[in-house]
Image: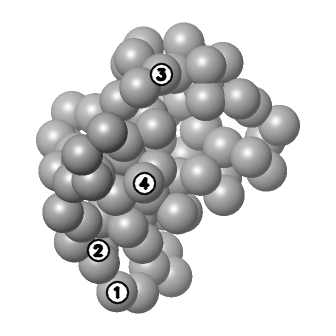
Amino acid sequence: MKRQNTNPISVAFGNKIRDLRKSRGLSQEAFAGIAELDRSYIGGVERGNRNISLINIQKIATALNLEIFELFKDIHE
């Protein structure tokens, strides 16, 4: 598999999503179902390989029962 270029902010955001998902005891597959996104897409987001859209950020926030701004708290490049 070819490694995609990653941006530091994308990696930091992905790490935050992974931490929040795991803290809720959700697998990527279960979380993807709740967020109505593909499991491989969630994996790409968590690795920082995706330039995620605002619509998908909203889906993730909703699935985590958070406001969008909370996903960006304490994110550092």
> Label 1 is placed on what type of residue?
Glu
Residue 9: numbered disc: 2
Q: CA distance from mark 2 to mark 4?
A: 11 Å
- Give the secondary structure at mark 2: helix
Q: How many other residues sit within 10 Å of disc 2, few (<14), some (14-19) or many (≥20)?
A: some
Horizontal placement of 22 versus 18: left or right?
right
Q: Residue at x 21, y 33 (%)?
A: 55
Q: Position of residue 59 (x, y in %)?
A: 38, 29
| SS state under label 3 | helix
Q: Position of residue 41 (x, y in %)?
A: 35, 29
Q: Residue 77: which numbered mark, if any?
A: 1
The residue lying toward the viewer, choosing from 47 and 23, is 47
- Amino acid type at mark 4: Arg
Q: Earlier in the sequence, mark 2 or mark 1?
A: 2
Q: Are marks 1 and 4 in contact (CB under 8 Å)?
A: no
From the viewer's side, name the closer residue of 26 and 39. Answer: 39
Residue 70 seen in the current view: yes
Query: Which numbered marker is on residue 64?
Result: none
The structure residue drawn at horizontal position 21% and vertical position 54%, both measured from the top left corner, is 4
Residue located at (41% from left, 87% from top): 76
Q: Which mark is residue 47?
A: 4
